[in-house]
Structures are given as C-alpha cells and as structure tokens.
Image: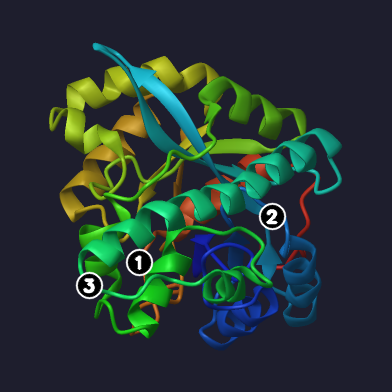
Amino acid sequence: MKFDLHVHTTASDGRDTPSGIIKKAYKIGLDLISITDHDTLNGLKEAGEEAKKYNILFVPGVEITIKCSFYGFDKDYEMHLLGYGFDLNNEELFNKLEEMRAYRFIRGNLILEKLNKKLEHKGFNKISKEEFDKIQKGVESFGRPHIAKLLIDKGIVSTNKEAFTEYLIECDVPKKMLSLKEASSLIHNAGGIVSLAHPWCGKDMPFLKLSSDLKMHKKFLEDMIPWIDGVECYHLEHSADMIENYVELVKSMGLIVTGGTDHHGTKLPDKLGTLNIPSLVAENFLKFMKNKDCFYQKKQSL
C-alpha cells in the first residue's frame, strides 16, 4: 500500500490546494492520505469529498503546535502533535484551533515590525502594509514560510533557508501553543488519535538537541505516553538508522508507528508519497482507526 500521513496544503503553509493534493495523490498511485495542516481543520471536507471521487482512503488530520517539558529538563520546548480521525464537527476542537489560527495573523504583524527594523538597518526598503496584507489574503493559517516567500519574491534573499537564517529566526515572535495535555485531550475528546510528529527532526524538534542517546528519548516518550497513541517514526528528515531504532522503540512501548513526507510543495522535485514506508504501517494504522468516525472511503482490498 502506498500512502502519506503527513501532508500540508494552502489551508496552512503548503503550495497545493486540498483538492489539488488529492488529484496529485491519485496520479502517483497513493491508496491512503491524510492532510495535516497547521492548527486548522479548513480544507479537510474539501479534500474528503475529492478523495471519494478517486476512491482514495482519506483520514482527516491536523498538526498542532504544543509546548512540553521533558525528563531532566525544566524548560518548555516546542513540539508538534498529529491528530487523526477526529470528528470534523467537534466544536471544542474547531473553536480552539480557530483561536490559534487567528493568533497566527497577530503574530505575523508582530514579526513584521521586527523584520522591518532589520531590513531598514541593512539598507533595504521596508515591507509595506499593502504588501503584507496581500500575502495574508486568502491564507487560512499564516506562518513564517509565507513571509519567507515574500522576501524571496522581493529579491532580498534567494532561498527559504536564507530567509530564516538571515531574518526570520532573529525576528521571530512566540507562537500561541497548547500544552501536550490540552492538545491531546482536544483530539481524543473529538474521537481521534494522537501521534508525536517527527521527534528526530533536528531543524525544529528538541529530542536531537537535548540528547543523542536513545535511552533518553525513551524517557522523554515515557513522560508523554498518557497523551499519545503513536509516534511518527518515518519522516524524510529522519535517518535510516533512527527510523529503524525508533520503530523498534515505539513498538516496544505499545505505541503505533506513523509516517509521512511532511509535504509542503515548496521544493522540487515533489516529495508527496516519496517516502518508502512498509505497507504494514498503514495496515496497523487503519486497524487502530477502525472504530473511529473517519472521513474515508473503504476499499474492498482492505
């Protein structure tokens, strides 16, 4: 079975529309897909309806930004949770995510204030309110990648990486983040399941920064066990060795294994569905989901 359980669209910071992602999934032969946009449920119904046309299994998803502390460390760190198979009409989940989504635009304007000071200091023209309003228009879940694209389009930087290293890391403003317990409870109360996203992704996630010792990672996960059902072991930024080690560790802890490309459509070649994940991962995932009120088409072969 070919699948991808971590995909972003224009509902947050991806380049493809929800229906466009489903069309792409069909063209490359995906059997199962989950769209997991940042802090928003927008686009999921559109994608679900499109998936029905192509008889693709579709599980609604979301990626929620959380803060949590870990064994031996007092500081709160940013992590991401993937929620799957929840009730799309759950008001508690929808309202909380709408609150977080709204703050993304407030945060964007706060970042702009800091960014313009840095641009002026380096001899560049400031980004005007009109320019900034334009990139926010029609965006469901605004984030720094949208600002990075503007910096590229204006010729201030050449790449997304340069935009972050030269400007956006220094000019950042903290996100509004839920606790692990709060985010997990929202998903579970809406009938879904929770998987910890890309714990070994060194760019953003703290596991690698805090320790390279897998035994320490086990202690981190043990602290999280009351609130998670699985871990995203397969990810494009996880090495083959770490995937192997994590799969063994996660299974030994009685958690499910998930995986996906974290596709945003911002880099070529297209990454959607390119991660080689064993079919058994998808089969176990669907077995775990079988009693959930999921928005997907059932196939005869499953």
Helix, strand or loop for disc 3: loop
Q: Which residue is mark 2?
A: 60
Which one is earlier in the sequence, the residue at label 3 or at label 1? Answer: 3
Tell me if 49 is positioned left or right of 141 in this view. right
Q: Secondary structure at mark 1?
A: loop
Q: Earlier in the sequence, mark 2 or mark 3?
A: 2
Regarding residue 292, the answer to whether it shows in the image is no
- Residue 284's spot in the image, x, y percent? 54, 46
Q: Is residue 115 left or right of residue 188?
A: left
Residue 123: numbered disc: 3
Q: Position of residue 82 (x, y in %)?
A: 54, 44
Measure the alpha-carbon separation of dots 3 and 1. 46 Å
Indicate the quadrant containing the C terminus: top left, top right, bottom left or bottom right: bottom right
Q: 189 and 273: which one is in front?
A: 189
Residue located 33% across and 57% down the image: 117
Q: Foreground residue, 43 or 150?
A: 150
